[in-house]
Image (cartoon, rainbow, N blue to C red):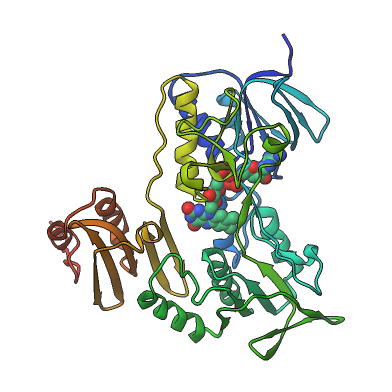
């Protein structure tokens, strides 16, 4: 037997792969798996890293499983990088000089941070926050620094700004959009976010593109809307790009991501792709934790010849920033084309429910955190207006617990 042969290899050890492995084992498939992990610590919950910048975190604090879980589940977890995929020979070559043979392969290489071109600064001086190593680097190199320029008004940019402010830093937040989080929330709710951001002292610049900065001996300057601003470090939260190199060079079909069909198969019958690296129908790359988890599971079921078709779940996002809980579901997919929008406010709760044919199609709200799961259920089940009034009243019903 060739010791470098594995019935199954997965490249990239994050939620798509872990969910793939869990499903195979749940289905009593015990074939040996090689998991090629390109990072420097046990596979971890990526969603935690930028939300815990204030306090920092231990190397394996957010691990999804301990080492024993991998050995117990017949998984050889190796810390290495896949450099070449040969789809004809069915081999994967790695940075440490190994060549592995597979029968079936899962590509779950995720995405990398986009580092924008900014004249006056080397790309290596611009920090991304895509992985735990990036966050460690931001914390180390920036510990003595006070003023930060964050480029990007999406979720990552807002969360990073919130963390740095809580750490007592000064933040300039520069966003191309008219308003931050504009793709996920309507203006009515974003007004509250903007007020909160500004009241904390963040210098928020909307509708600007940072194309050049001026570097001096010990700091940088940037001109935004005619204001000359000084800062010490720059962080880019300008999105992520799927890691498709291996697939592209191996001759698989690739556009924005690796093209997969509804069964998560690539253009090669023995290779599947799942998570942030995969491109689905209508050019969709999902970019969300729970979507990657779901795809890992489906990839496993399809590998076991128990095919399950992939349907994209509604996009759902929750975040807690600047003292607000924010929830958005299926907003971008629905707007425009919505027939009825019902906006309600009570105390600090502010919500808008969107209906077509009396069926709930999208929800956005601020601060109703305890009922987030119910809102999600209402959306998945497309509740009608009456059921929403009954089950999700505003103001919320107060429930008392009587002690015997
Ligand atoms: C800072 C941050 C915060 C986020 N917060 C949220 C959130 O709150 N909610 C949410 O739904 N989503 C969030 N996301 C998105 C979510 O984390 C991703 O959708 C999810 O992690 C995708 O999982 P994945 O398994 O496809 O790949 P990834 O998690 O991207 O992991 C891919 C892995 O493959 C490795 N890899 C790549 N190439 C190779 C190679 N050649 N050899 C070996 N290994 C390789 C990478 O190093 C990485 O470890 C966040 C993302 C980031 C970066």
**Residue reaching furthest right?**
217
- Compared to 331, does 222 lie above or below? below
Q: Quadrant of the N terminus?
A: top right
Residue 77 locus on image (x, y percent): 66, 31
In the image, what residue occupies the spot 52% across and 51% down?
A: 287
* Front-most of residues 258 and 44: 258
* Front-most of residues 136 and 208: 208
Displayed quadrant of residue 305: top left
Residue 249 in the figure: left or right of residue 161: right
- Compared to 318, does 230 lie above or below? below
Is residue 175 visible in the rendered image? The answer is yes
In the image, what residue occupies the spot 71% across and 45% down?
A: 40
Residue 205 locus on image (x, y percent): 58, 82
Is residue 168 visible in the rendered image? The answer is no
* Front-most of residues 206 and 399: 206
Residue 388 in the figure: left or right of residue 200: left
Residue 57 locus on image (x, y percent): 62, 57
Displayed quadrant of residue 175: bottom right
* Front-most of residues 302 and 324: 302
Residue 339 in the figure: left or right of residue 129: left
Q: Quadrant of the C terminus?
A: bottom left
In the image, what residue occupies the spot 37% across and 61% down?
A: 331
Residue 219 locus on image (x, y percent): 80, 81
Displayed quadrant of residue 388: bottom left
């Amino acid at each position: 037997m060739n010791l470098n042969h594995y019935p199954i290899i997965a490249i990239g050890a994050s939620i798509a792969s872990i969910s793939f492995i869990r499903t195979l084992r749940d289905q009593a498939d015990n074939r040996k798996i090689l998991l090629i992990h390109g990072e420097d610590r046990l596979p971890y919950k990526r969603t935690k890293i930028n939300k815990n910048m204030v306090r920092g975190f231990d190397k394996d604090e957010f691990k999804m499983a301990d080492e024993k879980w991998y050995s117990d589940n017949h998984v050889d977890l190796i810390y290495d990088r896949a450099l070449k995929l040969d789809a004809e020979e069915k081999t994967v070559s790695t940075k440490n000089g190994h060549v592995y043979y597979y029968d079936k392969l899962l590509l779950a290489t995720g995405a990398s941070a986009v580092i924008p071109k900014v004249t006056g600064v080397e790309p290596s001086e611009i920090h991304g926050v895509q992985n735990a190593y990036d966050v460690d680097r931001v914390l180390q190199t920036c510990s003595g620094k006070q003023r930060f320029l964050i480029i990007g008004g999406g979720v990552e940019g807002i969360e990073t700004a919130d963390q740095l402010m809580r750490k007592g830093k000064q933040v300039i937040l520069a966003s191309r959009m008219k308003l931050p989080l504009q793709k996920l929330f309507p203006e009515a709710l974003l007004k509250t976010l903007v007020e909160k951001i500004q009241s904390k002292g963040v210098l928020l610049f909307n509708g600007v593109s940072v194309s050049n900065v001026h570097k001096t001996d010990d700091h940088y300057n940037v001109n935004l809307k005619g204001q000359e601003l000084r800062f010490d470090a720059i962080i880019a939260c300008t999105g992520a790009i799927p890691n498709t190199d291996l697939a592209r060079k191996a001759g698989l079909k690739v556009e924005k991501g690796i093209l997969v069909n509804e069964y998560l198969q690539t253009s090669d019958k023995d290779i599947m792709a799942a998570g942030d690296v995969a491109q689905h129908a209508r050019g969709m790359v999902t970019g969300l934790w729970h979507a990657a988890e779901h795809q890992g599971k489906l990839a496993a079921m399809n590998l076991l010849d128990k095919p399950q078709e992939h349907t994209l779940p509604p996009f759902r996002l929750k975040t807690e920033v600047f003292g607000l809980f924010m929830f958005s579901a299926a907003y971008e997919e629905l707007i425009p084309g919505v027939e009825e929008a019902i906006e309600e406010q009570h105390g600090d709760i502010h919500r808008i429910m969107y209906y077509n044919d009396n069926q709930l199609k999208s929800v956005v709200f601020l601060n109703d955190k305890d009922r987030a799961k119910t809102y999600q259920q209402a959306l998945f089940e497309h509740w009608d207006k009456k059921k929403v009034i009954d089950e999700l009243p505003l103001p919320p019903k107060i429930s008392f617990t009587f002690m015997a």
